[in-house]
Image (spheres, rainbow, N blue to C red):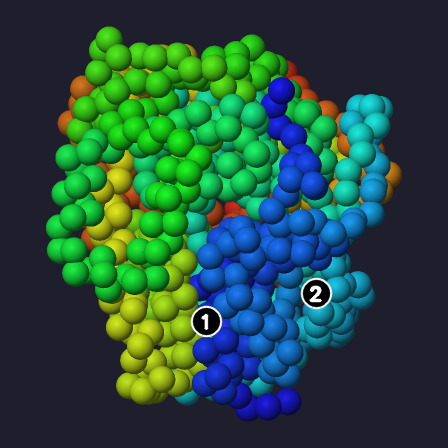
Amino acid sequence: MTDARHVLVVGGGPAGLAAAESALAAGARVTLLDSSDELGGQYWRHLPSARPAAHEERLHHGWQGFVRRRGVLAQHPDCTIVTEAQVWAIETGDAARDSAATLHAARDSAATLDASPGDAATRVVPRDGAAAENAAAENAAGAVSVTVHVLVGPPDGTDREPQTYRPDALVLATGAHDRTLPFPGWQLPGVYSAGAAQALAKGERVSIGDRVVIAGAGPFLLPVAKSLTQTGARVVGVFEASTPARLLRGWSSKPLELLGARGKAPELVDYALGHLRHRIPYRTGWAVVEAHGTDRVDSVTVQKVDASWAPIPGTRRRIAADAVAVSHGFTPRLELAIAAGCDITSDRFVRVDDLGRTSVPGVFAAGEITSIGGADAALAEGSVAGHVAAGGDPADVSLRADRRRRRTFTAFAARLERAHGIRSGWTGWLRDDTIACRCEEVSCGTIRSTVRRTAQTGVRSVKLTTRAGLGICQARICGRTVEELIRTAEHDAITPDASLSAPGDSGKDPIRPPVSTDRRPIVSPIRLGELAGLAASAQLPPDHLDLPDARPARSAED
Amino acid sequence: MAARMIRASNDPVQPLTADRIGLTLDGTPHEGLRGQTIAGVLLAEGVLSWRRTSVGDSPRGVFCGIGVCFDCIVEVNGVRDIRACQRRAQDGDVVRTQHDELPEVTS
């Protein structure tokens, strides 16, 4: 047992890896959790160790850096890596202290994990025996006591091993997922998020199709095009919704900022050259507005859009394609930060200062949950947050370069949003029968007419009436879309009121954005059997007995 | 054509050898490589969907590919609601198309 600070890092992508490494360098004991069985996150998604390749590096930027960092963490005596680790709840403050009493009993009942799931990279880890000892240190440091509940084992398994952590500091690096706006036919097999196309190409060496259309907004469409061409697919076009004028304004103002983000420039040039070499048409001011097919996609319709992304009549064009990959930006994975009580900004990222500190003492955030700035930003943010989380001096000379890079990439993120951010006119390509909520198959027309008919404008009440956002994905895919449909329908119907904020979200700041669709007290669906097992071993957080909006609850609710 | 595996001889990463594994989807055998997810095995075989929705009875397969959307859930060895894009396939897995009937309306 050492008296080093224990830093728990959630997320093994660029931000989490960098945070873990710098926390170790600053003298902390580190536990790194990731839900996958391989580290690297979505950015360095790669073939698993059971399926090695001679030249993995050919698919990645910064691969050597990743391998080096992964090696440092794997060999460091003060670092424990737990893969296939699903965090399903976080508690802070009093609730966390209450459950601490039950921890000892639970710990005694299961001293170690009996099996290391997945590949050899997973280490068998002891339970967090330092929890109780650390309580005193936490108080001294003024940090809020945080309890992190984890299930370890194969994804969606039935007998995953519960673990509980009470670290001195928590670094959240949970990343983001694609935001794909709905369009008619987007529920057909063969329509993928751009991230899926990328994940399947890198992690499976599967091509989503032979003739692929890529559409949406943002520079991320370019690496997706590159990955797909590297799978042998023919990319028949990349359709960027933002108009050329806006892209120019976003990218060309303050060119010195872009020079500062020097990690980015060669990467973008590389993608641009890739386009030339493969002769992929790249069109700006165009959007995919419909996917066609019966049981799978056979073609898509693209249409010109104006600066607000509203489709321009008379410009529809149908293209034969067997797959389409669409991404209009990213949604940060905020649920853990929200559960930990962290402030969320008006543009719905975790609020952090320039050291990665959130509004909750002892809780840090880095990477895409703080702004969408890409892997270089995430690495710099992770390094800074990990160092400070470990108790390192913020003025440390070793931190200067990362702090400078951090500032540069924050400007880069703002530029991305200016150039590619979602514009309100997109709802013009919806039809009444277009599916908005994929899980519960609720159409845009149903949501809009419910708002108009019943004068309901609260996200929660519209969700309960229509079931939009109550499916098994817990509104991860449709949440923000449903909010937007409610707001726009409501605009026609009645005066907006304050009811968009979530229950329990009350008071402090009336103009705070609605976070109801970002809030998931149970962060990941878990099985009733596992829940029962946790309750039996007294690990169930007392304040979180409300079940998630998952299928088993439906018949009781209806 | 639709989804497919990259031919190893054309793959710039030059994959090394991997064990072959087999699974069945609704009784039909499919072959894959150890380390593939269930979704990876099925897509590589040109299978795009393995769930039918409750309301529209329409086919679904992979959408987000990173474990967020739950569109690809499937029954594996008798256990339902497993994200095919997240679960590594094991040799001999018995996979069944998932279809959740809507609960009966009693009012």
Q: Amino acid at mark 1?
A: Ala
Q: Amino acid at mark 2?
A: Thr
Residue A122: which numbered mark, if any? Answer: 2
| Residue at x 24% of width, y 33% of height | A242
- Expressed as whole percent of the image width and height from the top left, the position of residue A335 reads 44, 52
Q: Is residue A313 above or below residue A223?
A: above
| Left or right of residue A273, residue A509 in this image | left
Which structural element holds mark 1?
helix
| Left or right of residue A431, residue A100 in this image | right
Q: Nearer the viewer, residue A308 or A335?
A: A308
Snapshot quadrant of residue A247:
top left
For label 2, count other residues whose C-alpha is less than 10 Å away and answer few (under 14), some (14-19) or many (20+).
some
Task: Identify the chain of the residue marked 2, using the numbered disc in the image.
Answer: A
User: Which residue, given by chain and number where applicable, does mark 1 sit on?
Assistant: A19
Q: Is residue A457 above or below residue A453?
A: below
- Expressed as whole percent of the image width and height from the top left, the position of residue A215 reads 38, 30
Residue A147 in view in this figure: no
Q: Is residue A88 above or below residue B40?
A: below
Which structural element holds mark 2?
loop
| Residue at x 42% of width, y 38% of height | A277
| Residue at x 74% of width, y 70% of height | A124
- Expressed as whole percent of the image width and height from the top left, the position of residue A319 reads 42, 15
Residue A378: which numbered mark, if any? Answer: none
Task: Identify the chain of the residue marked 1, using the numbered disc in the image.
Answer: A
Q: Is residue A501 above or below residue A112?
A: above
